Image: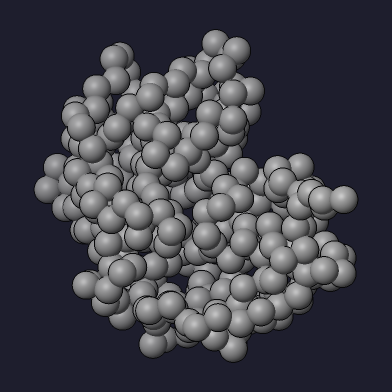
Amino acid sequence: MKKILITGAAGFLGSHLCDRFIAEGYHVIGMDNLLTGSLDNIQHLFPLERFEYYNYDVTKFVHVPGNLDYILHFASPASPIDYLKMPIQTLKVGALGTHNLLGLAKAKEARILVASTSEVYGDPLIHPQPETYWGNVNPVGPRGVYDEAKRFLEAITMAYRNFHQVETRIIRIFNTYGPRMRVNDGRVLPAFFSQAIRGEGLTVFGDGSQTRSFCYVDDLVEGIYRLLLSDHSEPVNIGNPDEITIYEFAKEVLNLVQNPEAKIIHKPLPEDDPKVRQPDITKAREILNWEPRFNRSEGLKLTYEYFKNVVPQKTSIS
């Protein structure tokens, strides 16, 4: 039986990856220090013999007994709120954590896939963004800790491949959504759903003309699975190229939730907020035969069902 280590296992993406690799017949070792993850996301896996969990900080030396076939490194604060609150931890898990896990992959002769991000493109001057684009990042801005951590992650991963011949894979993840997103993680989709369900103002920064491209989590997991098992070691974009302005997206959420008290409000644009974001997925189509299957309306309905159950309703005082 193949054995896989998944870091960030109690997070949004990590927990869905645990589910997928359990379903594929793997023995899964989940690792998370619960800085931003939650055991609620993986508690259904604890009774399984093929699942182990370690509460551990991967910025320290990582040891896993016995053989290991694959490593997925998905441990990192991943929303602007998180990395503004925890800038040093964000840099450490991208740098020291990646270094430790590459060392483990080398020792175990395991293949490692590391989670990079569309944020390596910064506020892009090329649209849509192909993997060949080097990006436009402010290294000392408030978002720089995340962007540069992930750029370093890519650099050290390629160094381990070229110098130590470690089998490596790099995925650049674009905006992803679905069940198990944290309600208060500060990203646009959880914020809009929470605000709409509570009947509050949906906070649109600036005039809302900035764009994002949202990929449903099941599609992303499929892309990760295919990339891990492929022969391709260069970075690959995985995301949904269906681009939408934030203002139009707010209207879609309002139409879905149908709370008459909810409305759109505008606030000033944060520093270094990317104006556009859209993946060029030509490479994923050609190399992995992958493209997203869920359109946004399908994905949003599934996500709304989750948020309905986890967002605390406003209680009216009579």
Reply above or below: 206 against 258: below
**Which of the 4 quarters of the picture holds residue 300?**
bottom right
Q: Where on the picture, by quarter, is residue 65?
A: top left
Q: Is residue 84 above or below residue 68?
A: below
For this orientation, the residue located farthest to the front is: 318
The foreground one among 243 and 158 is 243
The outermost residue toward the left is 163
Residue 87 horizontal/vertical position (percent): 28, 56
Residue at horizontal 48%, vertical 24%?
28
Give the image's coloring scheme: one colour
Residue shown at 63% from the left, 23% from the top:
44
Instruction: Give the image location of residue 297, x and y in percent.
Output: 79, 64
Q: Nearer the viewer, residue 101 or 253?
A: 253
As displayed, is residue 72 above or below residue 47?
below
Residue at 54% x, 85% y: name it: 206
Tell me if residue 93 comes above or below residue 70 in the rendering.
Answer: below
Question: Residue 21, can we see it?
Answer: no
Q: Residue at x 42, y 67 (%)?
A: 118
> Percent position (x, y) of residue 301?
80, 56
Q: Seen in the image, is 32 located left or right of residue 153?
A: right
Where is residue 315 shown, x and y percent of the image? 79, 49
Figure label count: 0
Is there any visible trace of residue 148 in the rendered image?
A: yes
135 sits to left or right of 259: left
